[in-house]
Image (cartoon, rainbow, N blue to C red):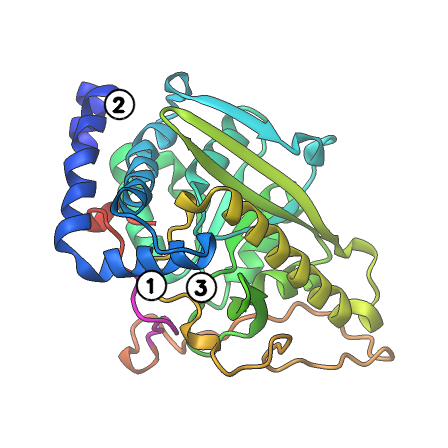
């Protein structure tokens, strides 16, 4: 699919997205059920089959467009940017998003249009998939991926932030043992990763919400907005600031998902983990001593002992999501 897209162009290969989306609608009941349940949650009514088809087609479109974004071929798209003033003047920040829309358009636009390199921190399996795609499309961009779960992951992120780069993370999925926070999401408790928020606090960085929203056809809306600024937050206030940033993140995510539901790309029961859990609980909250003078960075997520130790290989908390896309092109 990658070779065909690059050889024949976007318009031609987009014709394949319709039968692919129809196939998943008709013959992959798990994906269809996940989409149906989510759309019912958002719209407050049972979705029709065309609604579910449109959901699949939007996801397939962003996967297909990844080839062109990573190749730097922006001439095929109409892209609008909201919140670009967050980078005037250009300076480092941590960006937090979700499996909502396309983060490829964000990363590519940051590097090409504004000279703001964006590195994405990903869990190991996703990082390997993306790096395989990058090796086939644009090998120079492989450095833009920082795998989570390594001892040096946070050190690498900190070094890039010190160079004025941007670090992107997604807070809507986690690994077993990761710190989590529970927040109401579309009227029901849902679990979100606390790691990105704690990392921004520990590294004393600005925290921005990010989304690359697919609007249909060849149109995208890139959205940024500030969530928190931890550069001047004291240790005494850090925990409360992290909680407030998570609140703001979930509120903004819900508002944008409600406006653009076809961009929600978590094809599993997103609320399953949080049932019967209080709606404002954050795992392992630590009361930080205001008298402590230790401010050394501590990883906001646990690390497996070794990449080669099968006992500690991480697994997702939630059931493996059903991604209606070829394995090497999944988010």
Query: Which residue is more in the foreground, 52 or 100?
Result: 52
The N terminus sits in image quarter: top left
Q: Which residues are magenta?
A: 313-321
In the depicted structure, whether residue 276 falls above or below residue 6: below
In the depicted structure, whether residue 109 falls above or below residue 158: above
Q: Position of residue 200 (x, y in %)?
A: 66, 58
Residue 46 figure quarter: bottom left
Q: Residue furthest right?
A: 291
Upstream in the sequence, badge 1 or badge 3?
A: 3
Q: CA distance from mark 2 to mark 1?
A: 29 Å
Q: Which mark is residue 229?
A: none
Q: Which residue is mark 3?
A: 173
Residue 150 figure quarter: bottom left
Residue 240 figure quarter: bottom right
Helix, strand or loop under label 2 = helix
Rendered residue at 62%/78% (across/down): 281
Q: CA distance from mark 1 to mark 3?
A: 11 Å
For the stretch drawn in magenta, what is the main secondary structure? loop
Rendered residue at 34%/70% (across/down): 307
In the depicted structure, whether residue 285 falls above or below residue 61: below
Q: Which residue is mark 2?
A: 10
Q: Which residue is mark 1?
A: 268
Disc 3 + disc 2, Cβ < 8 Å: no
Mark yes or no: residue 158 visible. yes
Q: Position of residue 177 (x, y in %)?
A: 47, 79
Q: CA distance from mark 3 to mark 2?
A: 30 Å
Is 138 covered by the magenta stretch? no
Upstream in the sequence, badge 3 or badge 2?
A: 2
Query: Which residue is more in the foreground, 74 or 161?
Result: 74
């Amino acid at each position: 699919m990658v070779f065909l897209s690059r050889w024949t162009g976007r318009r031609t290969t987009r014709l394949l997205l319709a039968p692919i989306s129809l196939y998943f609608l008709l013959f992959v009941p798990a994906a269809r059920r996940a989409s149906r349940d989510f759309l019912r949650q958002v719209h407050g009514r049972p979705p029709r089959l065309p609604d579910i088809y449109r959901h699949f087609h939007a996801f397939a479109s962003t996967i297909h467009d990844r080839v062109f974004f990573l190749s730097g071929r922006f001439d095929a798209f109409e892209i609008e940017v909201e919140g670009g003033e967050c980078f005037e003047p250009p300076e480092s920040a941590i960006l937090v998003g979700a499996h909502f829309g396309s983060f490829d358009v964000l990363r590519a636009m940051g590097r090409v249009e504004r000279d703001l390199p964006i590195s994405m921190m990903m869990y190991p399996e996703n990082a390997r998939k993306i790096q395989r795609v990058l090796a086939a499309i644009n090998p120079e961009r492989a450095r833009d991926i920082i795998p989570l779960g390594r001892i040096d992951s946070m050190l690498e992120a900190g070094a890039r932030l010190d160079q004025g780069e941007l670090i992107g993370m997604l807070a809507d999925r986690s690994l077993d043992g990761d710190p989590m926070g529970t927040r109401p999401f579309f009227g029901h408790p849902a679990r979100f990763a606390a790691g990105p928020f704690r990392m921004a606090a520990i590294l004393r960085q600005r925290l921005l919400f990010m989304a690359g929203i697919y609007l249909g056809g060849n149109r995208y809306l890139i959205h940024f907005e500030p969530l928190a600024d931890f550069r001047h937050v004291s240790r005494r206030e850090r925990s409360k600031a992290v909680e407030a940033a998570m609140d703001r993140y979930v509120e903004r995510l819900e508002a944008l998902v409600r406006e653009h539901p076809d961009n929600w790309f978590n094809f599993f029961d997103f609320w399953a983990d949080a049932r019967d859990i209080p709606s404002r609980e954050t795992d392992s909250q630590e009361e930080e001593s205001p008298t402590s003078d230790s401010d050394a960075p501590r990883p906001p997520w646990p690390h497996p002992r070794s990449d080669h130790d099968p006992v500690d290989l991480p697994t997702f908390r939630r059931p493996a999501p059903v991604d209606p896309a070829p394995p090497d092109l999944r988010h």
